[in-house]
Amino acid sequence: RVPYQKRFTNPIGIYQGGMLAACLDETFGPLSYMAAGGPCLTLSMNVTYLGAFNEQMGHAEIHADILKQTKNFI
């Protein structure tokens, strides 16, 4: 759960996309670590935004699931 924080917004009060992408990576990281049984890193991340995150929303929820895991990739 990511709370809305004005310091991470643009001049019209919309959360910066890069900040949301960082929140996504912070969610994927621990999940990947647990699945891999050790350190791993994000090789590629593509984000498509479907709408704005603004103050009226209060917070954003981020959920992560492993859809496929091989020896080298999650």
Image (cartoon, rainbow, N blue to C red):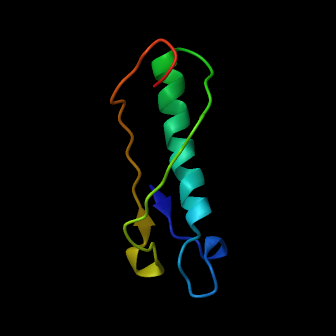
Q: Position of 53 compared to 16: left or right?
A: left
Count of residue discs: 0
Residue 54 percent across, percent down from the top left:
46, 77
**Residue at image x 52%, y 16%?**
72
67 vs 27: above or below: above
**Residue at image x 59%, y 16%?**
38
Residue 47 percent across, percent down from the top left:
48, 54
**Residue at image x 59%, y 35%?**
42
- 74, 32: nearer the viewer: 74
Q: Residue furthest right?
A: 7
Residue 49 percent across, percent down from the top left:
43, 64
- 16, 5: nearer the viewer: 16
**Residue at image x 50%, y 38%?**
28
10 vs 24: above or below: below
- 44, 52: nearer the viewer: 44
Q: The N terminus is located in which quarter?
A: bottom left
Q: Residue furthest bottom?
A: 12
21 vs 69: above or below: below
Q: Position of 68 compared to 72: left or right?
A: left
Residue 11 percent across, percent down from the top left:
64, 86
Q: The C terminus is located in which quarter?
A: top left
11 vs 72: above or below: below
